[in-house]
Image (cartoon, rainbow, N blue to C red):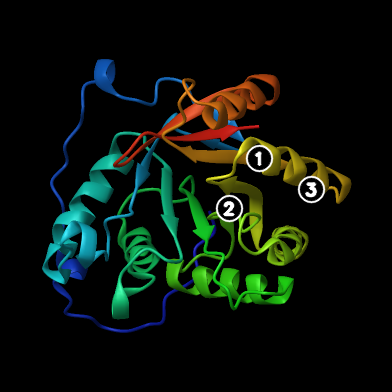
Amino acid sequence: MKLKKPPMAVTTSPCALFTPPTIKIPRLFRPSQQKVKVGPMTVSPMGFGTWAWGNQLLWGYQESMDTELQQVFNLALDNDINLFDTADSYGTGKLNGQSEKLLGKFITQYQGDANDIVIATKFAAYPWRLTPNQFVNACKSSLDRLQIDKIGIAQLHWSTANYAPFQERALWDGLVAMYDKGLVKAVGVSNYGPKQLLKIHDYLKERGVPLSSAQELAVQTNNSRGGAVVNFIKGNSRKAGQKCTTGSNKLVHL
């Protein structure tokens, strides 16, 4: 990952001066024994979810927690976890986007090698995002918050097919535009059912853009939706990685 150069400035931020202790988890217990290929990238099979960062409503986030969050971020990297999941909608109220901002801050302040960090962020299908260019602009805003020049995996956060089908194609074209402009290394989807998953897979393939990942919350084989998604995954995936976060999320390489 190529980081954007921060402006030359002197800061007295507590986080800037904070040096987390070095803690190593015994190799036997590490989740990263075997790396996973996602598009052109190599990631740890277990990733790190940041939904709670900036979310006061559901998780009681306070900015006073940032130093501790940075320590946990550093601990993950020091123990070979390099996949971090976020979204442009993570953070409530005035803290919208806080998760990406914190990741950007922690990446630039990390004392080790940050070049292998892979950010998987999700873009919300807000009703005002109606054109591919609006999605591209959303991607550029995430890049600014993350302080990087290219996103690892750009994902649609959810499908609008059931309530705003006219918007769905624009979102897909937005992914294509992000990829073609070199803003992202790979694209994927989140919370897609089997029918839309097949449709976007084929649509992107026709446009020369591989669908590299599918993230599904609480995929279960004991219901029709989950079973169909699992069957699609079995037919198209090579390796599945589990995301470390609340819930039973799976980020699957297609």
**Which label number is shown at residue 212?**
1
Packing grade of label 2 (10 A; few <14, some 14-19, many >=20) is: many
Q: Earlier in the sequence, mark 1 or mark 3?
A: 3
**Residue nearer the viewer, 35 or 246:** 246
| Residue 73 x/y as whole percent | 27, 49
Q: In the structure shown, which secondary structural element does the residue marked by tag 2 occupy?
A: strand
| Residue 25 x/y as whole percent | 21, 27
Q: Amino acid at mark 2?
A: Gln
Q: Amino acid at mark 1?
A: Ser
Q: Amino acid at mark 3?
A: Leu
Q: Which residue is mark 2?
A: 155
**Residue nearer the viewer, 163 or 57:** 163
- Quarter of the rendering containing residue 98: bottom left
| Residue 227 x/y as whole percent | 56, 23
Whether residue 133 sits left or right of residue 222 in the image: it is right
**Which label number is shown at residue 204?**
3
